[in-house]
Amino acid sequence: MLANLAFNIIIPTLIMTKLSSEDYLGPVYSIVVALSFPIIFGVKDYLENHKANFFSALGILSVVLTGGISLLQLDPQYIAIKEAAIPACFGLATLFSVRTKYPLVKTFLFNDQILQIDKVKAALEANHNQDAFEHKLVNASYMVAGSFFLSSVLNYILAKVILVSEPGTVAFTEELGKMTALSFPVIALPSTIVLMGALYYLLHHIQKLTHLKAEEIFNEA
């Protein structure tokens, strides 16, 4: 968690806000150096776990797009649109997946990294509550989608409020660093609270429908 914050938020923020003047790296190189850290972290995560992480890959894509838009000195509104588009796409995908055999809520919440899936499924079947649980999964999907849409709106507002200077300037680079720093408290925390609410909702109903205790549901670390 600390490494994640350091590579994705703290270090890039410090570089863009403190080293973007011409006396140090300058506005262009400070962006290049700062945004290289999330990419390095994503590659490191892949090499350590020996498997592709879709969310890490998407994070790297987001960083590359931000860097590309900044270095090409395009209108900052494109960064705002990009910031809003990625979580919005997740939200839409979550909603659309509800009607498929593989709802994304199972990827986010109902997975074997968090829960003892086989035990839960067996208990649901024993209590004849599979259909009732599927209904709860749909409700949880709406909550998860809501967290993404909330993130989308907050991302857009934050980018529009913070990025007001001309691209390619020291001021713009510092604003980009400020936006990166504020992304955690302003965006990640509210969205995480909503997501945790969805997880709590799902766990509450798993216990109710399976008659399992919490320690029987969670995977041991």
Image (cartoon, grey):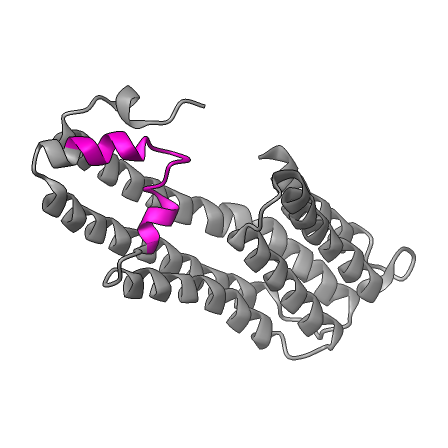
Where residue 49 sits, quadrant-wise, is top right
Q: Is residue 89 left or right of residue 18?
A: left
- Identified at 38% across, 34% down, the residue is 114
Compared with 211, 57 (above or below) is below
User: Percent x, y for residue 79?
Assistant: 59, 70
Compared with 6, 52 (above or below) is below
Residue 220 belongs to magenta span: no
User: Percent x, y for residue 78?
Assistant: 58, 76
User: Percent x, y for residue 154?
Assistant: 45, 59
Dominant secondary structure of the residues highlighted in magenta in the image: helix
User: Percent x, y for residue 137?
Assistant: 22, 48
Where residue 90 sits, quadrant-wise, is bottom left
Q: Is residue 88 left or right of residue 61?
A: left
- The segment highlighted magenta reads 104-123
Compared with 158, 116 (above or below) is above
- Identified at 52% across, 54% down, the residue is 54
> Could you say which is closer to the camera, residue 149 or residue 183?
149
* Picture quarter with the N terminus: top right
- Identified at 54% across, 70% down, the residue is 82
Q: Is residue 125 left or right of residue 119?
A: left
Where residue 123 sits, quadrant-wise, is top left
Residue 106 belongs to magenta span: yes
Q: Is residue 116 left or right of residue 173?
A: left
